[in-house]
Image (cartoon, rainbow, N blue to C red):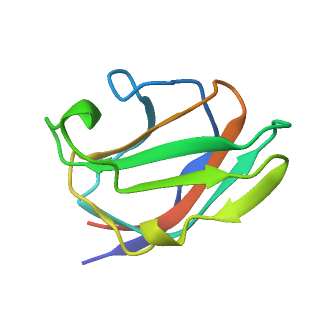
Amino acid sequence: MPVKYKNLSINDLIVATTAAAPDDCYINTNGVAQINSSTATNNSVSSVEVFIYVLPSGVTAASVDPAWRQVIPANSTVSLDGLIGKIVPNLGAIRAYAGTTNVIRLNIDGIEIT
């Protein structure tokens, strides 16, 4: 099975503020994907909580608990270690929302196995 290193979410600005309508950060259309590293950057003067979901096809963020949630301190970048090793199934997605719109940027790297 071929393995391809990939930026799953590159500097993705999170606009959504609810699980009912989270932002699509990555849609997997190439077999299985695995998260190898992830960071969140908060460009705000206040701490902001971010909620990240790793979902199979057909499952909504509002119907499950987030794969990872964390408060990101003001004006900082943190590693989201709880996402490392998470598997995004074929046709699955990484979706996210934050407590404040337009201040959190996600960077998620990984591999796709086809």
Residue 99 x, y percent position in the rendering: 57, 31
Quadrant for residue 32, please give it. Answer: bottom left
**At 70% from the left edge and 63% from the top edge, which residue is drawn?**
78
Q: Is 66 located above or below residue 79 in the figure?
A: above
31 displayed left or right of 104: left
Residue 14 x, y percent position in the rendering: 59, 32
80 displayed left or right of 85: right
Residue 35 x, y percent position in the rendering: 43, 67
How many numbered tags mark residues here? 0
Quarter of the image containing the N terminus?
A: bottom left
Q: Nearer the viewer, residue 92 or 60?
A: 60
Q: Nearer the viewer, residue 21 or 27?
A: 21
Q: Is 70 located above or below residue 22 in the figure?
A: below
**At 55% from the left edge and 58% from the top edge, which residue is drawn?**
108
Q: Is 70 located above or below residue 94 in the figure?
A: below
Furthest residue in direction left, as rendered: 58
**At 27% from the left edge and 47% from the top edge, which residue is drawn?**
65
**At 17% from the left edge and 41% from the top edge, which residue is drawn?**
57
Q: Nearer the viewer, residue 20 or 113?
A: 20
Residue 47 x, y percent position in the rendering: 72, 43
Quarter of the image containing the C terminus?
A: bottom left
Quadrant for residue 2, please give it. Answer: bottom left
Q: Is 50 located above or below residue 30 in the figure?
A: above
